[in-house]
Structure formats: C-alpha cells, structure tokens
Image: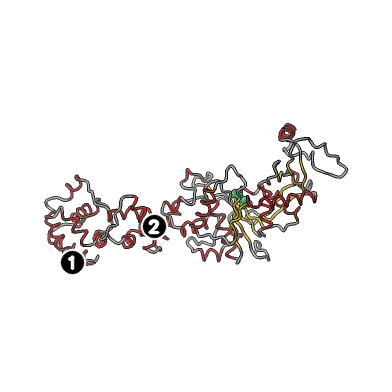
Amino acid sequence: MTSVTSSPVRTRFAPSPTGYLHLGGARTALFSWAFARRFGGTFILRIEDTDLERSTPEAVQAIIDGMQWLGLAHDEGPFYQMRRMDRYREVIAQMLAQGTAYYCYSSPQEVEAMRERQRAAGDKPRYDGTWRPAQDKTLPPVPADRQPVVRFCNPLDGEVTWDDVVKGPITISNQEMDDLVIARPDGTPTYNFCVVVDDWDMGITHVIRGDDHVNNTPRQINILKALGAPLPLYGHVPMILGADGEKLSKRHGAVSVMDYPAQGYLPEAMLNYLARLGWSHGDEEVFSMEQFCGWFDLDHLSKSAAQFNPEKLNWLNNHYIKLADNVRLAQLAQPLMEREGAQFTPGAPDLAAVVGLLKERANTVNDIATAALIFYRTPAPDAALVAQHVTPAITPALADFAARCGQVEWNRAALAAMIKEVLAQHQLKMPQLAMPLRLLLAGQLQTPAIDAVLELFGRENVLARLAAFVK
Ligand code: GLU
C-alpha cells in the first residue's frame, strides 16, 4: 500500500477553534483517527488557536465535546499553538541564522504598490525580493522605527511535487510562490509556519485534511525541506457538499456536529455516515467502528466531493436506534419529554418498554420522545372527536371492555383476545372500539397497535383514563 510509511503512523486533527465542530472537520478527524487506529499509530489533537480575534474558549470546548460525543479519543494533546510561541520563535531564529529566512522591512504600502505594478504588468503578484539577501547584493538601508517581518526564502527555481494520497501527484512551480511571511512585525509566527513546526515536532507521518488546504501544502513542504525535516504524506479530502451540489451550509440543515445529539442522532450512526462520505469499502454501507478501523485506508478515499444526504443519515440512525439498548434510548428521550411536560410519576409506564415499542419506526430519538409523550401526559382529546367516536352506540362496549380490564391477564396477547371478544359481543369492527380507546387513553387517533398501547399503559392507568367515560 502506497500510503503507509515504515515509521509508526502519527496523524493529527488540527482544528482552528473559531466556531463549532462542523461535519467536514469531524470527518477529517474520523479519517485521521481511524488511520492511526488501523496501523497501531498515534492520533494527536492540536488546537490551532493563533487567530486571536476569531478563536474562543467556547469553540475549543465545542471541538472537544464533539470529539467526545463521537468517541474519537486522541492519544496525545490537545496541544495549543498559543502555548508553543517560544518554540516557533526559536525556529525562526534558527532559520534567520541559517539564511533560510530573512528580515523584510518593506512596509505594507510598499508591498501593495509592488503588487499593483505586477498586476498592471499582467504578472502574478508576489514579493519582489527587495530584502532577500543574495551573494554580492547590497540590501537597502534599514528604515528607522520600522519593525520587520520575517520572510521565508522560498526556492527561486524548480518545483514542488508531492504524491497526494487522495488527489495523486501534484506539482507546483516555485515561481508561483511568494517568500512567505513567517513572522509578523510583532514577532508572532504566521499560520503556515506554526503548522510546519508542529507537524515536524509532533512527528506527523500523514496529514489528512480538507482540500481547502491544498494551496498551503507546497509552501509547507518547502519550509519543512529548509528545516531538514522529514516530509509527511499528504492527503487532501474533497469537501462535503449539500444535496444540491452547493457547499454545505446551514441552509442544508445542521452543520455543527453537536446539533445532531440535540436532534436525536446516535454517535454510531453519525460515525458510520461520515465514514462513507468520501470513502468506501466495496458495497459496505453499515459497519461498526471496529470494522471501519480494520478497513480504513487512504487508497479508497474519493477524489470527488461527497454529497450530504440527510435521508441516508436518517436511515442509518433508524438502523442504530433499532440496535440500541432501550434503557440507553430512554435516558436520552426522558429529558426531551420532560421539556414537553411529560410526567414520570410512580405507576407511569416503563419508558424503556415504551421505547421498545416505538423505536422500529423512529428516525431519531426525538421521534421516539414525541411519540412516547402520550404515555406521560393527561390526555386532552378534542371534544368534537370524542363526540364523533365515543357515541352512545359504543359506550356499552367500552363499559364491557373496562369491566373485562379488571380481570384480564395484562399482556398483549390476552388483551388482543379480550378485545376480539368484546367486538364479537357487541358486533363491532376493530376501529369502532380502537379509535375511542385511542382517543380516551392517548388523546389522539394515531397510536401504535392498541393491544401494545394498552399493555404499556398498564391496567391502573387504562382504568383511570376510561373512568370518566364509563359509568
Ligand atoms: N487549522 C486548519 C483548519 O481548521 C487545519 C490545518 C491543517 O489541518 O493543516 O482548517
């Protein structure tokens, strides 16, 4: 396999904490994590928080919460770039001493003017090298009171080539690239430089990231080479698009990973879903993380953008809900139900049993919670519906039913048999009894099978709810 090196695998997820953990980030994290798991390697979490204006502690927490919910545990870190400033300064000093970086005193206005001139001449705008040292070159006099930036001496000729494990070989001419600013006038290092030092120091062997970073890669490779650092393998994963082919955004539904538990999705469904978004293993659609970690490789990552498909996520979530333990689902559903006024008083039906009945048809835990409310709220049936369904013609059958409820063995099969007897006795059809019962017990006409509903309500609750209507 081309994508495995002889050294132990070390991957990283390196989010910038400027918002929530979005689906694309979570998928990158999942791929990096699974690749490390597959090869007995190490997965590192690195928080790229050097953009002080946009980074927030809440966003750091959102990333950590999202990773935790998904169960993507890191082996090392989290490392925070803001805590590594001394190290970056040290490497910058080394590069200045070795001549792979230089002080540049061109003012921002001068650089802008330079770019304007180049654009006007039809050239690609780039720093013109005024302050770049060269043999026999005399640099301009250092302007007073001006703090220099530090620029990297990008090679002037030749090209950078890497064999991207997703996209294949990519070659960029060095003439396309600027002498990148690696430290600002106040000495703080810039984004691409911190990434390079970190990937080097952390011994990263495989950089798996979104393809919005593909333009950074040749710059990072050049700096790594200048440092004499080993080069990791790079894999740039295409973006996730909405079902309409547009870049995934709020318009397409939730893009923050932590919106999904709030909407009743299970982490195993989300993981399975994300794993198939841009990666495949034959026709496998449903698999555990154990299987995924046994299979995941970089050779089967798709070159084209993946499309987010909410129906497929729902289908997977339904699959995992059906497999999930009822007590676990009940614990997830209960707080949602309490918010809707559900009362879990002694004698109320066992929520795990209710969940067991409802989960077959639920796409989300929230679907279960909504459907389960009938068991934990005083029914308030619409008066017109009651008048329509609980007619004088039906009342004797209801009374008979209630009387038999006092004696019948309380299980679904016995209840079904008893209902049949009542129907026969009163010469009624099933809906003529089931609809009034649904209305009086649940307050609505749609419920699961009436015998199952009765069983879950329990004898006491059924009799209490019928009492007002059956004298
Ligand atoms: N911090 C970058 C981001 O959040 C990722 C950088 C990288 O993976 O190299 O997009």
Q: Are marks 1 and 2 in contact (CB under 8 Å)?
A: no
- The residue type indicated by label 2 comes to Leu
Name the residue at 86% across, 39% down: 138
Residue drawn at x 54%, y 59% as measured from the top left: 280
Reading the image, the residue beneath label 2 is: 332
Q: Considering depth in this image, is 144 or 409 the residue closer to the camera?
A: 144
Label 1 C-beta lies within 8 Å of the nearest ligand 1 atom:
no
Assign the C terminus to one quadrant of the image.
bottom left
Q: Which residue is mark 1?
A: 408
Q: Secondary structure at mark 2?
A: helix
From the viewer's perspective, is 10 left or right of 105?
left
User: Which image quarter holds the N terminus?
Assistant: bottom right
* Residue type pointed to by label 1: Val
Q: How many marks?
A: 2
Image spot of residue 217 (x, y percent)? 68, 50
| Image x and y of residue 190, in percent | 67, 46
* Element carrying mark 1: loop
Q: Which of the 4 image quarters holds residue 327?
A: bottom left
| Mark 2 Cα shell of 10 Å, populated few (<14), some (14-19), many (≥20) | some
